[in-house]
Image: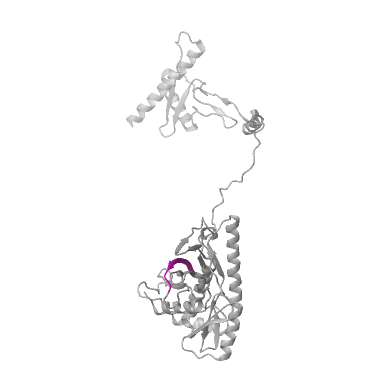
């Protein structure tokens, strides 16, 4: 899968911004992106972030036979991998031209510059030597792969520890980290690559080009240098002609940037060493920023349990409301109750429309009996009246009572009135049924 090409508008915009000495990410001409170095839990493992470009470096070692022409020197091997996870432009399988060029540049920068004392890796001359392998994996591609890869390789080599060995005659003993402390590698210097992108046939240049700036550049100059201002290698690509003054100016800028990056690597190694010695937190998981929801977090507070009975009584007294605030229920009729102040109980009372209908029905019945029957104004507490405004029916449920003989004469008179009202309601139902 090939990368998406830039449109003409994007290309024109980038070139015009560079001509105006501006960059799309807000940096100046000689500014680097933010560099972050993180070490893993094991020695020799680190991740370098150059802006959004991420490279994982891992160093490993093993005892192998030396080369025939160099029997007393160890072997240093570098391998850079560009996976499709980093960018859709990279394809697995056959190495691309870019990958071959980057691997050769790393070997010239680190191995050919003799940054590691390879003779210190010899265990038995002509028999066994240490082979140091540096594997670099590009995790995300946002431009300037070679600078990020060189920083990751140097940081991983400085952080790596090989097992300690002892030789007795022809017997070689390799000790585990529990038996003996691992031994760091002997490094003479730390070469770092600095990339310069040229535009409009060398008229403008930028340090640490991003991925979009690499697409529109005319040429690239890579200078590998250590903090002593010793040039390890120089590579120019793109087919542009550079003047001597341009190369000298780039070398001066590279010397300043290499000194800053070297100091950053040393500080990161010292911080990791201090954290391991003090037993603090270290590794990739500890370096990631924590994003937690703390809305339900409760602050811990100390509790005195010496007088827990008295404290319990205080808590209970505070939780219970005072006696004045609690109102007692008022029973108006069997099965009903009212708590607190409010509107009086209207259960069993008839509405105004029902009162008018009942008065009319009573008036129509009264000529036959030649007497006027008055509707009781209000039912007693023993009566339960259910009213329905839609049906205009009045149903009176009489509560359970004793025998009529035991009742006083006043109560029997009321019962007669109630029976007359129930008769009128029955006649009312018959009239509606006839309609």
Q: Is residue 337 left or right of residue 95?
A: right
| Apparent side of residue 345 relative to residue 129 in the rendered image (left or right) | right
Towards the viewer: 337 or 317: 317
Q: Residue at x 59, y 86 (%)?
A: 249
Q: Is residue 198 magenta?
A: no
Task: Using the image, determine if residue 163 lies above or below residue 202.
Answer: above
- The image quadrant that residue 254 belongs to is bottom right
Task: Give the image location of residue 151, x and y in percent.
Answer: 53, 72
Q: Residue 299: x percent and y percent? A: 61, 46
Residue closest to the eye, 117 or 122: 122
x and y percentages locating residue 397 in the rendered image: 43, 22
Which segment is the magenta one?
A: 55-66
Above or below 313: residue 104? below
* Residue 64 inside the magenta-drawn segment: yes
Residue at far front of view: 169
Q: Is residue 198 visible?
A: yes
Location of residue 334 in the rendering, given as x and y in whole percent from the top left corner: 50, 22
Task: Pick the quarter of the image with the N terminus.
Answer: bottom left
Q: Main secondary structure of the magenta part?
A: strand
């Amino acid at each position: 899968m090939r990368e998406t090409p830039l449109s003409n508008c994007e290309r024109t915009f980038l070139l015009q911004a560079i001509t105006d000495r501006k960059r799309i990410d807000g940096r100046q001409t000689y500014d680097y992106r933010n560099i972050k170095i993180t070490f893993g839990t094991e020695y020799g493992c680190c991740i370098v972030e150059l802006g959004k470009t991420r490279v994982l470096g891992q160093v490993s070692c093993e005892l192998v036979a030396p080369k025939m022409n160099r029997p007393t020197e160890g072997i240093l091997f570098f391998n850079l991998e560009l996976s499709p996870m980093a960018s859709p432009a990279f394809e697995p399988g056959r190495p691309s031209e870019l990958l071959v060029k980057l691997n050769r540049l790393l070997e010239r920068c680190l191995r050919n510059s003799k940054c590691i004392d390879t003779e210190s890796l010899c265990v038995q001359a002509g028999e066994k030597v240490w082979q140091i392998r540096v594997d670099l994996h590009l995790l995300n591609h946002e431009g300037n792969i070679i600078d990020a890869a060189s920083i990751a390789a140097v940081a991983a080599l400085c952080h790596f520890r090989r097992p300690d060995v002892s030789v007795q005659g022809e017997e070689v003993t390799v000790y585990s980290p529990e038996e003996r402390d691992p031994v760091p590698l002997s490094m003479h210097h730390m070469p770092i690559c600095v990339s310069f992108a040229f535009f409009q046939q060398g008229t403008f240049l930028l340090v640490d080009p991003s991925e979009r700036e690499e697409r529109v550049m005319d040429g690239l100059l890579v200078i590998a240098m250590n903090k002593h201002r010793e040039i390890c290698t120089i590579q120019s690509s793109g087919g542009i002609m550079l003047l001597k003054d341009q190369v000298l100016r780039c070398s001066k800028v590279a010397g300043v940037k290499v000194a800053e990056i070297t100091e950053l690597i040393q500080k990161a190694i010292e911080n990791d060493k201090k954290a391991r010695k003090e037993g603090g937190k270290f590794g990739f998981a500890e370096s990631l920023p924590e994003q937690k929801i703390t809305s339900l977090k409760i602050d811990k507070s100390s509790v005195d349990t010496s007088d827990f009975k008295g404290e319990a009584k205080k808590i209970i007294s505070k939780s219970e409301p005072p006696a004045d605030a609690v109102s007692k229920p008022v029973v108006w009729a069997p099965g009903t109750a009212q708590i607190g102040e409010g509107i009086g109980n209207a259960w069993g009372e008839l509405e105004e429309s029902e009162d008018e209908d009942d008065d009319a029905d009573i008036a129509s019945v009264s000529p036959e009996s030649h007497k006027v029957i008055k509707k009781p104004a209000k039912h007693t507490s023993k009566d339960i009246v259910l009213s329905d405004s839609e049906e205009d029916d009045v149903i009176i449920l009489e509560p359970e009572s004793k025998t009529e003989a035991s009742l006083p004469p006043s109560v029997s008179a009321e019962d007669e009135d109630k029976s007359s009202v129930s008769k009128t309601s029955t006649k009312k139902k018959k009239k509606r049924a006839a309609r």
